[in-house]
Amino acid sequence: MVSEFKAGDVVQLKSGGPKMTIDKLVTWQGVASAACDWFVGSAQEQQGGTFPLTSLKVAQESGPAVAVSQPSRGTVWS
């Protein structure tokens, strides 16, 4: 089976969830799968898991990334 995915692709579960980056393609318990990494929470804690390729889709582009900075001391945000 030829996979449409490769290491470095950004994917999501077909059922939703965070965007994940494929680390490597593997066979896990006899199923073609992808080992993926993603970040969660405000602390950007790294998570990882392995998912069957049939449960993944290419993540939709959401436009250019925008850096969000923290307000400096004394800054009032309204």
Image (cartoon, helix red, strand yellow):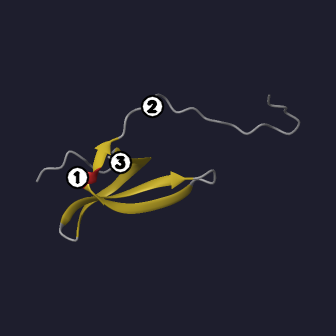
CB of mark 2 within 8 Å of CB of mark 3? Answer: no
Amino acid marked by disc 3 = Ser
From the viewer's perspective, is 64 left or right of 32? Answer: right
N-terminal of the two: label 2 or label 1? 1
From the viewer's perspective, is 70 left or right of 15? Answer: right
Residue placed under numbered mark 2 in the picture: 62
Horizontal and vertical percent for residue 18? 45, 48
Q: Nearer the viewer, residue 70 or 7?
A: 70
Question: Could you tell me which residue is drawn at 25 percent across and 59 percent down?
Answer: 33
Question: Could you tell me which residue is drawn at 61 percent across and 35 percent down?
Answer: 67
Q: Which mark is residue 2?
A: none
From the viewer's perspective, is 38 left or right of 5? Answer: right
- Quadrant (top left/top right/bottom left/bottom right) for the N terminus: bottom left
Residue placed under numbered mark 3 in the picture: 15
Residue placed under numbered mark 1 in the picture: 54
What is the residue that sits farthest to the left in this orientation? 1
